[in-house]
Amino acid sequence: MARKKREVPEVNSSSTADIAFLLLIFFLITTSMDTDRGLARQLPPPPEENQQKDDIEIKERNMLPIFLNLYDQLMCGDDVITVDEVRERAKEFIANPNDEENLPEKFAIDVEFFGNVMVTKNHVISLRCDRGSSYSVYLAVQNELVAAYNELRNELAMSQFGREYKELGEDEQKAIREIYPQKISEAQPKKYGEK
């Protein structure tokens, strides 16, 4: 008697592609993506075609150099500081409340809502970092610099208008930005020892 070979039943795989596609869509929808990270910076407009390149000289007293080395140590001018000290140093530099000679020079300008105000319109905060420095410390320094401007603007808004800066109208915010313009210069990162 001849035995019949048993056939192995086939598995129906016609819907496998559909299931894989549905799983892919499910994971794409349910996965959270952090897209709000980074620095908000407004780039200057491109130079006009006929505009000449002029080297702008900045007086030493009008510039606050901050350097982040490859060991994540900060130098502010000639002083070694921590990230926690950056905000207060920047605020004192930007506002120059006592009109000190080693801080930015002040000029009188006419500002809507405020009248004639003495401001440090030529100040620049120059941030430079080493290529070996960590991105997290670099971002922390950037956040402290922006926070310094925000605190100064909030303090002025509260004293003049009795409201926070973000609650003010566009014209009022513009007036405060004229008094405290954000000027952060970022030099290209260099390796330790490069000139």
Image: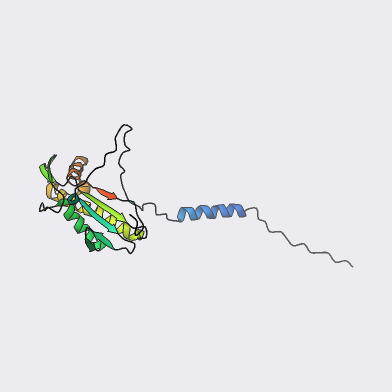
Residue at point 49%, 56% (across, down): 27
Residue at point 39%, 52% (across, down): 35
- The residue lying furthest to the right in this view is 1
Any part of residue 68 in sight: yes
Q: From the viewer's perspective, is 170 left or right of 13?
A: left
Q: Say above or below: 164 vs 44.
A: below
Residue 46, by quadrant, is top left
Q: From the viewer's perspective, is 191 left or right of 29?
A: left
Where is residue 136 drawn, in percent x and y? 34, 60
Split into 4 quadrants, where in the image is the N terminus? bottom right
Q: Nearer the viewer, residue 106 or 54?
A: 54
Q: Say above or below: 49 vs 192.
A: above
Split into 4 quadrants, where in the image is the C terminus? bottom left
Residue at point 27%, 49% (across, down): 185
Where is residue 120 drawn, in percent x and y? 16, 47
Where is residue 148 drawn, in percent x and y? 22, 54
